[in-house]
Amino acid sequence: MASTTFSSQQSTALQNKHISLSLEQTHAIRSQIKNARGILRAEDIDQWCNTLSVSKETLLQGLVPFASEFAVAPISKFYVGAIVSGLDENELTHFYFGANVEFDHQALSLVVHAEQSAINNAWLNGAKKITQIAISDAPCGYCRQFMNELADANEFDILLPKQAFKLNELLPHSFGPSDLGNKYSLFNSAPQQYQFVDETLDKKLVEYALKAYVPYTNNYSAVKISTAEQGDFYGSYAENAAYSPSLSPLQSAISQFFLAGLNFDGETVTQITLLETKGFENQRTVTTAALASFGSIAKLQVISAPIVAINS
């Protein structure tokens, strides 16, 4: 279940109104993005801006077709790409790619939207602030609501093929975290106050679970996708004040998986592990449903573990 566009564009040089690449340059950038699991690093951005004599914003918009290549859309056949331009803790700019993911023969509500995918990619990989997001198509209401959970929701630019907006232009009179009494937000979550009691748990899985943004359910939860040869892929639970646009840890992890250009099949995936907070569990059903799209390709291990306050 991989993108049809990814295979069909391999022999075509990328050229659009923003950038014009040779076939060799096209292959080089595509490889950089895949090898970094959906990220174009600051040094590579600077290199390509110099080589192509373009600004970072022009490069950002020009690379959106690469993001669309990672889409997995067996239902809609509509391949959406998005790229977040984000700053890390050292104020360096990286590009974080994202694409839509659909789950065949399952409820349409399980879909991962491209904007969610790109924002999730930035969040999981250390971005501290979003400055711009370039998208191949106008964001739907669902995505606008998801973006409204961000700390800098009304600051970053939304770059579409023909227009640019601020989020408050696309989502006036919005409903957000503060309406539920939540003073925190995605990219600006509450200071970590808990730890899992079981010290034998996978430390990296625990790290991603404790990173989860869960102000509404307190289910610190994460998923690990283990592969035979490509390492592990992790995802964290990211909730939303409107609830529906929340991103499950499985959606978060599987989006990261597809950004490496991999096929989700029995030869690649060996196991999937879901970690939830005991007493607050809510992810087993949706995880099982999403995985059913791919058949019985891997064993699902579900762990429910208690947490305690750090100072207790």
Image: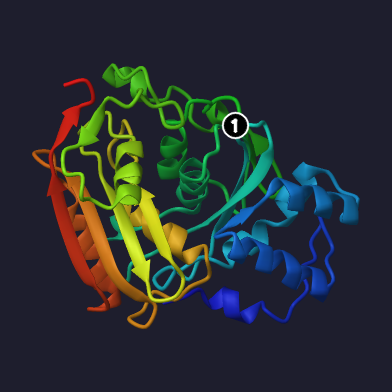
Which residue is nearer to you in this view: 13 or 283? Answer: 283
Q: Residue at horizontal 25%, vertical 45%?
A: 221
Indicate the quadrant where residue 63 lies.
Answer: bottom right
Which residue is nearer to you in this view: 290 or 208? Answer: 208
In this picture, residue 105 sits left or right of residue 5: left
In this picture, residue 77 sits left or right of residue 292: right
Q: Is residue 72 above or below residue 195?
A: below
Which residue is nearer to you in this view: 77 or 269? Answer: 269
Question: Which element type, helix, strand or loop, lies under badge 1?
Answer: loop
User: Is residue 246 something one can see in this rendering?
Assistant: no
Its colouring scheme is rainbow
Measured from the top left, where is residue 278 in percent x and y? Answer: 11, 42
Q: Is residue 238 above or below residue 254?
A: above
Q: Is residue 110 above or below residue 131?
A: below
> Quick one: label 1, few (<14), some, or many (20+) residues within 10 Å?
few
Measured from the top left, where is residue 186 in percent x and y? Answer: 42, 32
In this picture, residue 44 sits left or right of residue 295: right
Measured from the top left, where is residue 257 in percent x and y? Answer: 44, 63
Residue highlighted by disc 1: 89
Q: Is residue 212 above or below residue 16?
A: above
Which residue is at the far front? 199
Indicate the quadrant where residue 181 lies.
Answer: top left
